[in-house]
Image (cartoon, rainbow, N blue to C red):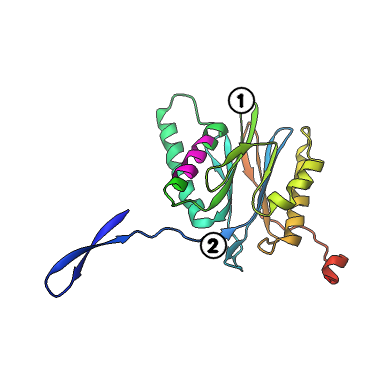
Amino acid sequence: MTFTIPIENGNGVKNAEADSQRTLYPYVTGTSVVAIKYKDGILMASDMGGSYGSTLRYKNIERMKAIGKHSLLGASGEISDFQEIMRYLDELILNDNMWDDGNSLGPKEVHNYLTRVMYNRRNKFNPLWNTLVLGGVKNGHKYLGMVSMIGVSFEDNHVATGFGNHLARPILRDEWREDLSFEDGVKLLEKCMRVLLYRDRSAINKLQIANITEECVTVSEPYSLKTFWGFSAFTNPS
């Protein structure tokens, strides 16, 4: 994208082209999102920290939002780009509701839409600096998928972004099972978030857990985990 700037050069006015500026590096970012399927739906967890570079500048940022009637979105990465994505989705859901035909977009459709948006922006060399987790339940079918900032997407029984992809996924591979109850699912997510709190400098001890079922979407009030810092690896790092 270019625009024209008039420049005085003594002999008159000439035109010069200046390139529009793009997000070259994320500024305020959120860290890991972890999500799992459980017996009745989808559970998703994230903390509420927003890092300005390496500084934990903000501690009250919600990074999980309900999308329409059937979907829940969580995001890591640049917070302003996440807000832009939410504007896209608000418009998408509004247009869908205007049809008033008794049908509504499900999580699979929203996931496919996000995949196209992220890949389109990547092809313009102007990516949205986020990794997205999209979960939902429609007509009894549980859906959980992820989209990277360059449009790579997949569906799985459990997903994690950021450091969670390295530290939480091994725990989920060992302990996740399809018939998890709500209580056991919450305990498993809290275990993952506790490990991330210990090992990820961008994580904070203030998290939310969201639950989506066939009936509704609920996001918990922020709360803190019980932690223990007396491990020998913490007291004697050498």
The three-letter code of the residue at mark 2 reads Val
Crowd rating for badge 2 (residues with CA inside 10 Å; few <14, some 14–19, many 20+): many
Instruction: Name the residue: 43% across, 37% down.
Output: 94
**Which numbered disc flags the more N-terminal residue, 1 or 2?**
2
Residue 28 - label: 2
Q: Along the horizontal axis of the image, is 192 left or right of 87?
A: right
In the picture, measured across the screen, residue 128 lies left or right of residue 188, that is left
Give coordinates of residue 20: x percent, y percent.
35, 58
* Count of numbered circles in the view: 2
Residue bearing mark 1 = 139
User: Which residues fall within the magenta stretch?
Assistant: 112-120
Judge the density around disc 1: few (<14), some (14-19), many (≥20) Cα neighbours within 10 Å.
few
Nearest the eye: 109 or 218:
109
Residue 75: x %, y % from top left: 58, 49
Query: Tag 1's secondary structure?
Result: loop
Query: Can residue 230 be seen at all in this image of the molecule?
Result: no
| Residue 5 position by quadrant | bottom left
Residue at 41% x, 28% y: name it.
Answer: 99
- Check the image and report above or below for 125 versus 104: below
Q: Nearer the viewer, mark 1 or mark 2?
A: 2
